[in-house]
């Protein structure tokens, strides 16, 4: 089993760019896709990045995803921040050993 | 329009059972894996269980293994979660989520959730 570790919170000013990291504790980050979810207060989660760096239709291109094999981590980058981006963000990946799904602990973004 | 509607939550005593349901519409239900994810208010997301499109592959999170059973009825486009031997730590908002054709896919649709309260 592996864990996905995210910073508890990040803060940035409107119009700026923020990056949220998601570090895999064991096994290669590239061995299974990483997906990202946004959860606004009081709402259900929505998918904002799938398969490491793909954007679902309707998600602004201000949202981008990447993986870094050297740090064994994935990142979600949001540019041109607005107050609408204030939310909790979760990374998620599949554990092929357990055939289960792993979520990161979540990161609260304050704009 | 893709829609997932959970039901069956409520107040239950520790040790008792509860069955959650998720009614799906707007997509070809039997093409996709389905999952249950829970969230304690104010805390993070925890994956509970997942079932493949044909029920041939089922997996559970460690905290519910042996107590919860996920199932689906493709004819009724419904997902279920039978929860037995409930504990206080099972108290959470339970979401139904639509996966992809395989277990590695993102959850591209979530319901509004149904709240389970475990208390005597």
Image (cartoon, rainbow, N blue to C red):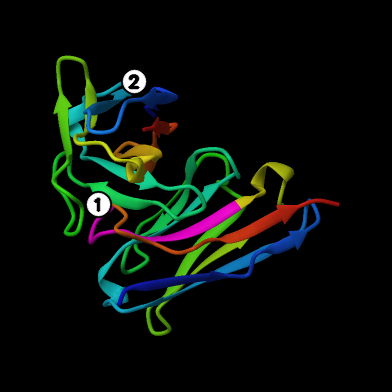
Task: Tell me if mark 1 has few (under 14), some (14-19) or many (20+) residues whose alpha carbon lies within 10 angstroms of its own.
Answer: many
Subunit that carries the residue with mark 1: B
Residue B85 lies left or right of residue B97; in this view the side is right
Dividing the picture into quarters, in which one does residue A25 lie?
top left
| Camera-side residue of B111 and B46 | B111
Vertical arrangement, residue A75 with respect to residue A26, above or below? below
Residue A45 % position (x, y): 40, 51
Residue B67 lies left or right of residue A27; in this view the side is right
Residue A6 visible in the displayed image:
no
Residue B8 % position (x, y): 63, 70
Q: Which residues are magenta?
A: B93-105
The quadrant of the rendering that contains the N terminus of chain B is bottom left
Q: Are marks 1 and 2 on the same chain?
A: no
Give me the residue at 15% from left, 22% from top. A68
- In the rendered structure, find residue A25 and report the number of the disc placed on it: 2
- In the rendered structure, find residue B25 and report the number of the disc placed on it: none
Task: Tell me if mark 2 has few (under 14), some (14-19) or many (20+) residues whose alpha carbon lies within 10 angstroms of its own.
Answer: some
Give me the residue at 38% from left, 32% from top. A109
The residue tagged with tag 2: helix, strand or loop? loop
Q: Is residue A86 part of the magenta span, yes or no?
A: no
Task: Tell me if label 1 and label 2 are in contact, CB under 8 Å.
Answer: no
Q: CA distance from mark 1 to mark 2?
A: 20 Å
Give me the residue at 19% from left, 59% from top. A58
| Camera-side residue of A108 and B80 | A108
Residue A41 % position (x, y): 49, 47
Dividing the picture into quarters, in which one does residue B9 lie?
bottom right
Q: Residue furthest top?
A: A70
The residue tagged with tag 1: helix, strand or loop? loop
Q: Residue furthest right?
A: B120
Q: Which residue is mark 1?
A: B105
Q: Residue furthest bottom?
A: B75
Give me the residue at 37% from left, 66% from top. B55
């Amino acid at each position: 089993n592996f864990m996905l570790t995210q910073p508890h919170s990040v803060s940035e000013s409107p119009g700026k760019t923020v990056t949220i990291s998601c570090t895999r504790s064991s096994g290669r980050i590239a061995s299974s896709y990483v997906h990202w979810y946004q959860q606004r207060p009081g709402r259900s989660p929505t998918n904002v990045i799938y398969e490491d760096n793909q954007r679902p239709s309707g998600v602004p291109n201000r949202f981008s995803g990447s993986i870094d094999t050297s740090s064994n981590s994935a990142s979600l980058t949001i540019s041109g921040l607005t107050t609408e981006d204030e939310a909790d963000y979760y990374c998620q990946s599949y554990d092929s050993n357990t055939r289960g799904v792993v979520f990161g602990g979540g990161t609260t973004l304050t704009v | 329009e893709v829609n997932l509607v959970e039901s069956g939550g409520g107040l239950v005593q520790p040790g008792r059972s509860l069955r959650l349901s998720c009614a799906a519409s707007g997509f070809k239900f039997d093409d996709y894996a389905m999952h249950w994810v829970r969230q304690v208010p104010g805390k993070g997301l925890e994956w509970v269980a997942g079932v493949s499109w044909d029920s041939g592959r089922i997996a559970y999170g460690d905290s519910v293994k042996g107590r919860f059973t996920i199932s689906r009825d493709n004819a009724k486009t419904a997902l279920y979660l039978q929860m037995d031997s409930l504990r206080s730590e099972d108290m959470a908002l339970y979401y139904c989520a639509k996966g992809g054709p395989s277990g590695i896919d993102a959850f591209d649709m979530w319901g509004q959730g149904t709240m389970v309260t475990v208390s005597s």
